[in-house]
Image (cartoon, helix red, strand yellow):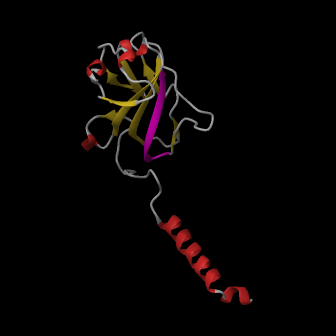
Amino acid sequence: MKILLRIEVLFLLALAVVGGAWVLLSDKPGALDEGKPAVASISKDPGDGSTLIRRCHLERDVGNARLDIELRMTNNHSKKLLLAPPVLRLINAKGADVPAYFLPTEPPPELTAKSTHEVRMRFWLEADDVKGELVLEVDGQKFNIKTAAPLNLETLKNAEAKAMPVGGDWGAVK
């Protein structure tokens, strides 16, 4: 048992104990506002306790674009909530669903029951999608992401993310 007398082993054991205690005693990730009432919803007002749309980024990819919507969502349901259709959808001006942008290693986010999470939703926009209004529908509630004012993708630099005003006129962004 001379191995337990070595200073390096004692240091690593102490580090493991401290790390394990920190993981077990720290708050659960995403459990920010567990006691707040209301179902999953979206608002631009951060003071109401519901979900907040933080920002929208648009990145042009030749004739298409990837839209990243970062939001803070509260799931007050008693079971987990998968953020995929029909729970969460982006709808274009024609009333059609905009397809989600996904990678095989990046599945749609899930919100555990009675918790709040920071999530990023990605959508793949065609050139026609940015020529009209975009509406995000979450759990039956609708929220404007873009006005009906058209945006010409050719005015944006290729492969450069651009911050877009939530619910605003994207055509005015240069």
Residue 59 % position (x, y): 43, 27
Residue positioned 32% across, 23% down in the render: 144
Q: Residue furthest right?
A: 1
132 above or below 102?
A: above
The number of discs equals 0
94 above or below 146?
A: above
Q: Residue furthest front?
A: 157
Quadrant for residue 69, please give it. top left
Residue 159 % position (x, y): 45, 28
Q: Nearer the viewer, residue 91 or 37?
A: 91
Q: Nearer the viewer, residue 57 or 135?
A: 57
Residue 67 % position (x, y): 43, 27
Residue positioned 51% across, 45% down in the render: 112
Residue positioned 52% across, 38% down in the render: 109
Q: Quadrant of the C terminus?
A: top left
Quadrant for residue 135, please give it. top left
Task: State whether the magenta stretch is mostly helix, strand or loop.
Answer: strand
Look at the image and give the residue range highlighted in magenta: 113-125
Q: Is residue 23 left or right of residue 40?
A: right
Q: Quadrant of the N terminus?
A: bottom right
Say if residue 76 shows up in the picture. no
71 above or below 84?
A: below
Say if residue 147 shows up in the picture. yes
The magenta stretch spans residue 61: no
Residue 35 % position (x, y): 37, 51
